[in-house]
Amino acid sequence: MPKICFIDSDGARKEIDAPVGVSLLKLARELDLDVPGSCGGSCACATCHMILPQDMYDALPEPSESEEDMLDLAFGLTKTSRLGCQVKVTEDMDGAVITIPQK
Ligand code: FES
């Protein structure tokens, strides 16, 4: 099972064994990170904004148009930003370090 590390908005590092196919939002909730996920994962709020490492971002399919629209509303958007509810864990994410932006 891939191991994924999150850096929470307060700088704390938390690691989790991430089952393949689970969303990054679900992992964040399990770790009690500062990720509200207010819309429950339906791509309608941008509160699950996460910053991915470049190689992980590059390996993912392009964000959908609705994800792009929501990302435009996210605070502190970067070139490797994604919505955590729209990204599912894959085997090759092992060792990835994902940053939760400061609010
Ligand atoms: Fe609302 Fe991801 S939880 S967009």
Image (spheres, grey):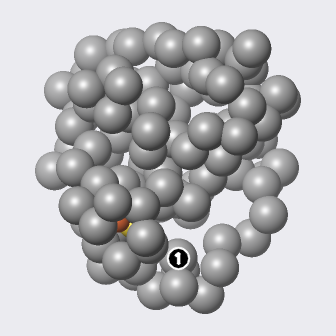
Residue at image point 79% right, 63% down: 61
Image coordinates of residue 90 in percent, x first then y, are 78, 36
Give ligand 1's quarter of the image: bottom left
The residue closer to the viewer here, 94 or 88, is 88
Disc 1 CB within 8 Å of nearest ligand 1 atom: yes
Residue at image point 61% right, 22% down: 18
Q: Can residue 74 be seen in this view?
A: no
Image coordinates of residue 91 in percent, x first then y, are 82, 28
Which picture quadrant has residue 70?
A: bottom left
Instruction: Say what secondary structure mark 1 lies in.
Output: helix
Image coordinates of residue 4 in percent, x first then y, are 59, 21
Which picture quadrant has residue 100?
A: top left
Q: Residue under circle 1?
A: 67
Q: Which amino acid does label 1 sit on?
A: Glu
Residue at image point 41% right, 61% down: 41
Q: Is residue 32 above or below residue 17?
A: below
Left of 62 or right of it: where is 19?
left
Q: Is residue 25 above or below residue 41?
A: above
Image coordinates of residue 56 in percent, x first then y, are 73, 42
Residue at image point 61% right, 39% down: 22
Left of 33 or right of it: where is 43?
right
The residue closer to the viewer here, 82 or 27, is 27
